[in-house]
Amino acid sequence: MLNIDLHCHSTISDGLLTPIQLVERAALRGVTTMALTDHDDIAGLAEARNAAEAKSITFINGVEISVSWRGRTLHIVGLNIDPEYPPLVEGLANIRAGRSQRAENIAAELAKIGIQGSLEGAYAHVGERRLIGRTHFARFLVEQGYAKDVKSVFKKYLVKGKPGYASHEWATLSDTVGWIRGSGGRAVIAHPGRYGLGKNIWNDLLQEFYAFGGSAIEVITSSHTPDQVQHFARHAHAMNLMTSCGSDFHGPGESFFDLGQLPEFPAGCTPVWHDWNHQG
Ligand code: AMP
Ligand code: MN
Ligand code: MN
Ligand code: MN
């Protein structure tokens, strides 16, 4: 088991635990190094870092940035970022600014199939209003009995081709990798198995990501099958990219892996932390 977890969410974005509760859970579960990677926001980092230091956990400043690339949404994790780097701070503020309008659009789409009150309903589940997102709508839909859990919501609603979908322009891939790199961090393609990219498009993404200065692929994550783990490990190796791992934990019962419960990398991977000094 790996006791390093470099991808998880707090109430700052769409997690269910506050940054402090998240760190406490990680400590109880034997995590020794962790990154908090809230969507498009870094407001939880200082609090989480203090809590982690009190528990002797090595804390990595992280973020998960929403990107639009060729008409698709991708997530890029930044690790070891400087949360005060102005282009990153401004870039994230711009991404967040689009979320409230998008939430209205989602609510309007849901109203078309007779689901009323979803905007207020989603906001009732959000920690920070500026981070309103699909998970909050999903929790509202579960509460109203439209699906049994959050995962099932995303099979019927809120995704392209289903009710409650609203398209949205996030940041560009080149800006995102640029902010992360510019702030001294490493950019990681989060959960690549989730995007359903065909071979050619995936290769294009890898080439572009590499050319922009991307560093790693998230190989171990709750959403990958064992075959996908092997597959993406091979691609990382072939492209000379490092590998990362994270539960993508959002709350108890909401992700396949809990904090610090991750399987080891396949042989031949170069972990994204291999040259971080404090890993000693
Ligand atoms: P947003 O950034 O508002 O588009 O919301 C994206 C979030 O929705 C992701 O970070 C996940 O937390 C959640 N999500 C998306 N697809 C799924 C899925 N298939 N199962 C569970 N959660 C999902
Ligand atoms: Mn999420
Ligand atoms: Mn993600
Ligand atoms: Mn995530």
Image (spheres, rainbow, N blue to C red):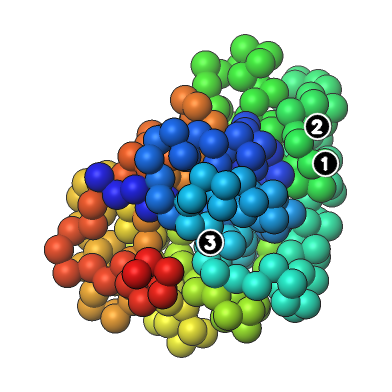
| Quadrant in the picture for residue 185 | bottom right
**Residue 168 in view, yes or no:** no
User: Label 3 is placed on what type of residue?
Assistant: Ile
Residue under the image location 41 percent in, 73 percent down: 276
Q: Which residue is mark 3?
A: 60
Q: Which residue is mark 1?
A: 129
Q: Secondary structure at mark 1?
A: helix
Residue under the image location 50 percent in, 34 percent down: 25
Q: Residues within 10 Å of mark 3 (few under 14, many from 20)?
A: many
User: On the rendered image, what quadrant is the C terminus found in?
Assistant: bottom left
Residue under the image location 69 percent in, 23 percent down: 140
Q: CA distance from mark 1 to mark 3?
A: 25 Å
The reply to whether dot 3 and dot 2 touch (C-beta < 8 Å) is no
Percent coordinates x, y for residue 235 in the rendering = 26, 70
Q: Any mark on residue 123, and which? A: 2
Percent coordinates x, y for residue 69 in the rendering = 57, 68
* 11 up-or-down from 242: above or below: above
The reply to whether dot 2 and dot 1 touch (C-beta < 8 Å) is yes
Mark 1 / mark 3, whichever is N-terminal: 3
Q: Secondary structure at mark 2?
A: helix
* 246 up-or-down from 236: above or below: above
Residue under the image location 79 percent in, 41 percent down: 128
**Residue farthest left in this picture:** 267
Mark 3 / mark 2, whichever is N-terminal: 3
User: Label 2 is placed on what type of residue?
Assistant: Tyr
Q: Residues within 10 Å of mark 2 (few under 14, many from 20)?
A: some
- Mark 3 against mark 2, which lies toward the viewer? 3
The reply to whether dot 1 and dot 3 touch (C-beta < 8 Å) is no
**Residue 181 in view, yes or no:** yes
